[in-house]
Image (cartoon, rainbow, N blue to C red):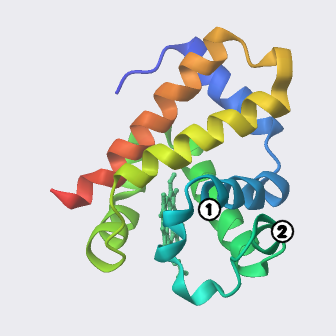
Amino acid sequence: VCWTSAEKAAINCVWQKVDVEKEGPEILSRVMVVYPWTQRYFPSFGNMSSPAAIINNAKVSAHGKKVLFALGEAVSHLDNIKGTFAKLSEFHADILHVDPHNFKLLNQTLVIVLARKLGSAFTMEVQAAWEKFVAVVSAALAKGYQ
Ligand code: HEM
C-alpha cells in the first residue's frame, strides 16, 4: 500500500483526536446494537439484552478499548499494517472464527462515530484517507483466512 503524505497527515490528525477510553466502548457498543448478530462472538460478555445493557457492560467497554488500541498500532505502523496484524489475523481466523465481513461492519461504525465527533473537520479528503486506512486494516486482518 502506498500512502501520500496528505493521507498520512489526515490519518494521524484524526487519530490524535480519538479518545480510546471514550470512543472504544462507543464503537463496539454500536456494532453490537446496530448489528446484533455480532454479539454471538462474545458469549462470555454477559448481559447484552438492550442498548443500555451493552453500553454499561464493562466487558464490552474493555474490549472496545482493546480494539481501538490495536487500531492505534496500525496508525503507528502505516507502512507495515499487514505485519503488525499478522498474529491478530490468525487469531480472528483460526481461533475466533470471526467472519471477515464483520470487519466491514466495524469500519462503517468507526467512520460514523468519527464523523460525528469531528463534525466539519471530517472533510471529504479526510474521509477518503480514513476509508482507505480501515480498508487496509480489514485486508490485513483477513489475510490469515487464506
Ligand atoms: C479479540 C482487535 C474486529 C471479535 C481481539 C483482540 C484484539 C482485537 C486486539 C484481543 C486479542 C488478544 O486477546 O490477544 C480487533 C481489531 C478489529 C477487530 C483491530 C478491527 C478493526 C473484530 C470484529 C469482531 C471481533 C469485527 C466480531 C464481530 C473478536 C473476539 C475477540 C477478539 C470475539 C475475543 C474476545 C474475548 O473473548 O476476549 N480483537 N478486532 N473482532 N475480537 Fe477482534
Quarter occupied by residue 90? bottom left
In the displayed structure, does residue 10 sit left or right of residue 89? right
Residue 87: x %, y % from top left: 35, 67
Residue drawn 84% across the image and 73% down it: 56
Q: Which residue, given by chain and number where applicable, does mark 1 sit on?
A: 32
Residue 46: x %, y % from top left: 67, 88
Amino acid type shown at disc 2: Ala
* Along the line of sight, the residue nearer the viewer: 76 or 85: 85
Residue 12: x %, y % from top left: 68, 31
Residue 146: x %, y % from top left: 15, 56
Q: Secondary structure at mark 2?
A: helix
Label at residue 85: none
Amino acid type shown at disc 1: Met
Residue drawn 74% across the image and 39% down it: 113
In the displayed structure, does residue 117 sit left or right of residue 27? right
Residue drawn 50% across the image and 32% down it: 133
In the displayed structure, does residue 117 sit left or right of residue 144? right
Q: Which residue, given by chain and number where applicable, does mark 2 sit on?
A: 52
Measure how far apart labels 2 and 1 are at the Cα level: 11 Å
Q: Is residue 78 above or below residue 57?
A: above
- Mark 1 or mark 2, which is nearer the start of the sequence? 1
